[in-house]
Amino acid sequence: MASDKMLAVHFDKPGGPENLYIKEVPKPSPGEGEVLLKVAASALNRGDLLQRQGKYPPPPGASSILGLEASGHVSELGPGCQGHWKIGDPVMALLPGGGQAQYVTVPEGLLMNIPKGLTLHQAAAIPEVWLTAFQLLHLLGDVQAGDTVLIHAGASAVGTAAIQLTRMAGAIPLVTAGSKHKLQMAEKLGAAAGFNYKEQDFSEATLKFTKGAGVNLILDCIGGSYWEKNVNCLALDGRWILYGLMGEEDVSGPLFSKLLSKRGSLITSLLRNRNKKYKQMLVKTFTEQILPHFSKERPQPLLPVVDRVYPVSEIQAAHEYMEANRNVGKIVVDLPQ
């Protein structure tokens, strides 16, 4: 392969996983203040599935290649780089796209050191989901010690991160999930209780756990189909943060009057389309406050949960596995070196 080319995940038209294949494409060059990252591993996100389906286009100016996070080594420094990165440094990166390729360009302010003791596969499982969970809990949800937090899809990648960050904040994490295995994993990570939404009304179970008080904060990636149960188990002055629509998009019923009676706040958030300045602030804050807690030298280190690793040649199978909702934690994609 020519030195100005690389391999990347590609699809010619929106559709199912069968449309994905590996293609030789032009290798990017770092612009002003950017670093060229030689990718060792990337991780799969729901956003990748939606983009493949034609429902979630990349932000203007971002790579059309899938992949919202990656780990690897600094390969080249663009003009004007001011940071401390050197060629060969092992790093992980938050991306608006482009991670599922052998190389990707990254603004230097969106790179993070890999915590001591973590593998490149584990590092690839951190940026998008841990920054999302941190943002939801702290920047938007203003989580406080003693709060009770209901985390939907508790065994998802964001869910497994949110459980640990909730505990670290001195708050009490509760989760919903669809199987006994997923609930057991969530409780192993620190969930105080878990509710199987297929077998019981999570709203009633939450109210029972909280002795009728309800939860102070809900992290919701489901959407419309959960609205009534969410409002029902929300405490007075509670915050309900919507960051995904894995369930129905539409709402039918008296949402506003019920939310108003709780004096509840409904906050919506996406990370991918935030501007570079916001993302750099988020990365800097996370690096200072949270990243040291991943070190294996800590008494209770934070743990990125990796379900399984696929070689990029099996990208179709990786998408099928996520679409079947079988994963607990992250699905990581290994790039050829």
Image (cartoon, helix red, strand yellow):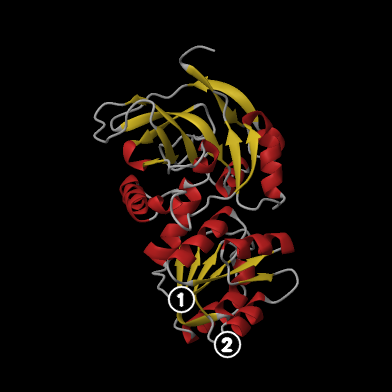
Q: Which is nearer the eye, 94 or 83?
A: 83
* Rendered position, 265 above or below 277: below
- Percent across and percent down for residue 255 are 55, 78
Q: Write down the residue under mark 1.
A: 147
Task: Indicate the quadrant where residue 42 lies.
Answer: top right
Q: In which quarter of the image is residue 86?
A: top left
Considering only vertical position in the picture, is 218 above or below 77? below
The residue lying at 70 percent from left, 45 percent from top is 321
The type of residue carrying mark 1 is Asp
Q: Residue drawn 72% across and 75% down?
A: 200
Callout 2: SS: loop
Left or right: residue 196 versus residue 329 is right
Does dot 1 land on a helix, a strand or a loop? loop
Q: Which residue lies furthest to the right in this view?
A: 199
Give the x, y percent position of residue 109.
32, 41
Specify whether 186 is left or right of 274: right
Q: How far apart are marks 2 and 1 (CA)?
A: 14 Å
Query: Dot 2, how many residues are within 10 Å of its Cα: few (below 14), some (14-19), or many (20+)?
Result: few
The residue that disc 2 covers is 211
